[in-house]
Image (cartoon, rainbow, N blue to C red):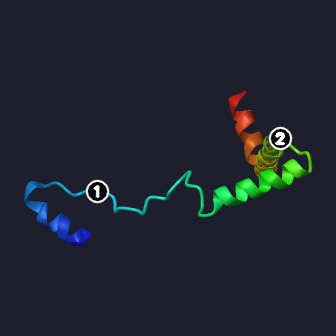
Amino acid sequence: MNTEERSVQNEPTGKRNTTKPKRKKKRSNVKPEGFQEFEALAKGILEGQEVSYFEWLHKKHQEVVLHFNLSNKDFIAEMAREVD
């Protein structure tokens, strides 16, 4: 049943059906297939190089945040000015 048919059915009551169309829900925080195997391999490689996996991962997180901030620096500056 499309939107027109729903609103026609509801005309006698004077109410319109305002339900939104359903969207596919994006799966979030789901590890991709094979993640654990690659994580274990990366940990092994870094351990062999005497590098802490968690220090390395922390640096990667910082890089993501820094890149995001630099990409949006004008917007961030504008938001900061609005707060003042």
Local crowd at mark 1 within 10 Å, few (<14), some, or many (≥20)?
few
Q: Position of residue 1 (x, y in %)?
A: 21, 72
Which residue is at the front of the view, 69 or 83? 69
Secondary-structure class at tag 2: helix
Q: Nearer the viewer, residue 32 or 77?
A: 32
Question: Closer to the camera, 52 or 25?
Answer: 52
Q: Which of pointers 1 and 2 lies earlier in the amino acid sequence?
A: 1
Q: Is residue 34 above or below residue 30?
A: below
Name, please, the residue furthest toward the right: 49
Does residue 26 appear to the left or right of 19 in the view shown? right
**57 vs 80: above or below:** below
Q: Residue at x 89, y 51 (%)?
A: 48
According to the image, label 2 marks what residue? 55
Quadrant of the rendered image containing residue 41: bottom right
Q: Which mark is residue 19?
A: 1
- Residue type at numbered disc 1: Thr
Answer left or right for 42 relative to 4: right
Task: Give me the residue at 77% from left, 46% from top.
Answer: 61
Badge 1 marks a residue whose secondary structure is loop
> Counting other residues with Cα less than 10 Å from the Cα at mark 2, is it few (<14), some (14-19), or many (20 or more)?
few
State the image coordinates of residue 63 (x, y, percent, origin top left).
82, 49
Q: Quadrant of residue 83?
A: top right
Q: State the residue lying farthest toward the top.
A: 84
In the rendered image of this protein, does residue 18 appear above or below residue 77? below
Q: Residue at x 53, y 53 (%)?
A: 28
Type of amino acid under label 2: Glu
Residue 54 drawn above or below residue 46: above
Q: Tell me if label 1 and label 2 are in contact, CB under 8 Å.
A: no
Seen in the image, is 69 located left or right of residue 50? left
